[in-house]
Image (tube, grey):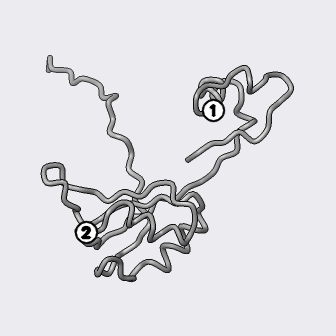
Amino acid sequence: MQHRLTSVSAEWSVEDHKVAGGVHPYVCAIGAFDLRETVMSKKLFVGGLAWATTSEGLKKAFEAYGDVTEAKVITERETNRSRGFGFVTLADDAAAAKAMSEMDGKELDGRTIRVNEANQTKPAGGNRRPRNREQ
């Protein structure tokens, strides 16, 4: 999910809170909830990729459907060779739906690819309670 500033109230000035790359995130988090508009993005799973397919090639294949915010081919750590799947994030839900329906079953770099909505995984917890070892 991405956020962008849509308007500024008269009570504070964006110019007072600018940092490199935009408005300071703490300013947005504390005093500007009503000034943000939520922009939904959709992550797609792309399977059946050729080993020769790169992240850049994956991005180019999906750019015809809309603004690709991220494209990544997953590689093995040791060999840096493709694992045969990747993920593409499109900025617009409608564009993602169209890309999913039109690209699923198409050929990319000599292989027939599968395109599905990616499963949203929960971040690994680090908030576990220690076991009571006295028992």
Residue 19: horizontal and vertical position, in percent? 61, 25
- Asked whether, in this view, residue 121 is left or right of residue 19, the answer is left
The correct choice, above or below, for 92 with respect to 20 in the image is below
Q: Residue at x 34, y 28 (%)?
A: 127
The correct choice, above or below, for 72 with respect to 104 in the image is above
The correct choice, above or below, for 103 with respect to 14 in the image is below
The disc labelled 1 sits on which kind of residue?
Gly
Q: Nearer the viewer, residue 15 or 8?
A: 15
- Asked whether, in this view, residue 107 is left or right of residue 94, the answer is left
- Quarter of the image for residue 86 reads bottom left
Residue under circle 1? 22
- Quarter of the image for residue 85 reads bottom left
Q: Residue at x 55, y 55 (%)?
A: 41
**Gap between marks 1 and 2 measured at Cα:** 37 Å
SS of the residue under disc 2: loop
Viewport quadrant of the C terminus: top left
Residue 88: horizontal and vertical position, in percent? 43, 61
Sequence-first disc among 1 and 2: 1
Residue under circle 2? 52
